[in-house]
Amino acid sequence: MFEVFETVLGRCSNLGASYIELRGESGFQEYIQMDDEKISALTQRIEKGVAVRALVDGAWGFVSTSSLNKLDEAIEDAFKMAKVVAKNRREPVKIADTRIYKDSIESRAKEDPRNVPISDKIGYLKNIHRIIRDFDERIKAVTVKLRTASGVKYLLTSEGTKIESPVNLIWVYTWVTGKESKRLSAGRHEESSTHEGWEFVQKKATPKKIGELVANRVVMQLEGVPAKAGTFPCVLGPRVVGVLAHEALGHLAEADLTVNSSFNGKIGKTVAAPGVSMTDDGTLKGVLGSSKYDDEGVETSRVEIIKDSVLNEIMTNREYAAKLNLRLTGNARAESFLHPPIIRMRNTFFEEGDLSFDEMLEDIKFGYYCTDFRGGQAQSNASFQVGIQEAYEIINGKLGNPVTDLSISGIATDALFKITGVGRIEDRIWETGRCGKGQEVFVASGGPDIMFEKGGITFGGKT
């Protein structure tokens, strides 16, 4: 694909664009859904195409095409589009300088999922179903989804960057419902990897692990005590802390959103209790959101968003690094060649502290320990609401009964000041999933157990 890119880029060098970027993809994608042991969806497709982005007269033009034979035409269309947009821009777009990289990255996947027989994949889903169904007779419905992808991405820019990198994806999602008398419950769980092949489901996302995790959550919801509404001291576990780090706080630190967020103008100011730090890191080996380069060819980095209670820096792409005079962080990502790269998180998490779990619980007379969430949402003012699918009462410093029908809400930027303890990380737990911001990318989030005083988190319940 590079040979075609270079030939076409040479022919279009006289158009007058200050920058041209070609991102190509070639690969295989498959999706299978099983509802109550029946296949409800099975699709396979070969994915191949090119994204063209041209910067002309201070404006972007973007075109995607699935035909390499029409690449000249696509570049010209992107150029014309940018020329039209430029007439209506008040402030011309500039991009920060970056190092030029020429690199070819090898895939670490051992078993390409496209070479795995479809019968093996269906068998894997059936095994998950069987383990969930056999866990408890009160489980009534099971949905399991499997999505795989493998291929190659190509990036060539008019500046000289030339990067070839692998595309790998294994994603497994379960949704399970239960019923006892008039009481209903539901639980979800997902596991994913962007670095491994089919070996991921054989060693890590096994049917036993996934099936027992999600089935246990559903049963606990049926057997749990009703949640109390109000505000109480609490400890949030790694998965719940992760969703706050990503949804309620991380988006505030994406430079294209910061201007309209609660973090606007606060770099260098205290935004959290002493000892609280939060990071986005695209360099962590083997973690879902990691890669060597972003989709603009910038090397990824560790972004210390909050450093010891102070808002330290925000995530950028080339455009916003130039616009705000900030460093390039390597956070430009695109779902596919159908989308332009925009500022996105990768692996977002709170840094660990020095408290043991028992030390965090010991002074709580009544409160909650929330370990996993079902779903949630947040706004640009840092308000959030999250449904909790696994939680326990804390009574006199000890874990008590599981809790059902619990949700949490609050203003995350206020809650940061209500943190009274940050735990040690004995075994790091990641929440792996998908982030939508007009387009989907895979991300990870997490952290240690974190303790909040009364007033930090509001709980919704029935009593």
Image (spheres, helix red, strand yellow):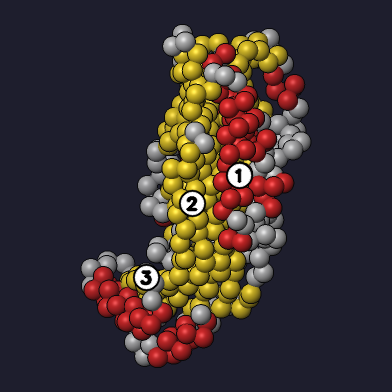
Q: Where is residue 454 in the image (x, y as percent from the top left)?
A: 55, 18
The answer to whether the residue labelled 1 contacts the one labelled 2, judged by CB atoms less than 8 Å apart, is: no
Question: Which mark lies nearer to you, 1 or 2?
Answer: 1
Number of numbered discs on residues: 3
Q: Is mark 3 on a helix, strand or loop?
A: strand
Q: Which of marks 2 and 3 is nearer the N terminus?
A: 2
Q: Earlier in the sequence, mark 1 or mark 2?
A: 2
Pick whichever, 360 or 8, lies toward us: 8
Q: Position of residue 50 (x, y in %)?
A: 43, 73
Name above or below for residue 97 compared with residue 196. Answer: below
Q: Is mark 1 on a helix, strand or loop?
A: helix
Left of 262 or right of it: where is 122?
right
Which residue corresponds to mark 1?
123
Residue at the image point whose x is 47% and y is 43% from the top: 39
Which residue corresponds to mark 2?
31
Mark 1 packing: few (<14 Cα in 10 Å), some, or many (20+)? few
Pick whichever, 403 or 120, lies toward us: 120
Left of 417 or right of it: where is 21?
left
Q: How far apart are marks 1 and 3 (CA)?
A: 37 Å
Q: Which amino acid does label 2 sit on?
A: Tyr
Q: Position of residue 371 (x, y in %)?
A: 61, 28
Name above or below for residue 166 compared with residue 451. Answer: below
Indicate which disc residue 64 carries: 3
Residue at the image point whose x is 34% and y is 87% from the top: 15
Q: Distance between the residues labelled 1 and 2?
A: 14 Å
Q: Position of residue 210 (x, y in %)?
A: 63, 36
Residue at the image point whose x is 48% and y is 28% from the top: 141
Toward which corner of the image does residue 403 lie, by quadrant? Answer: top right
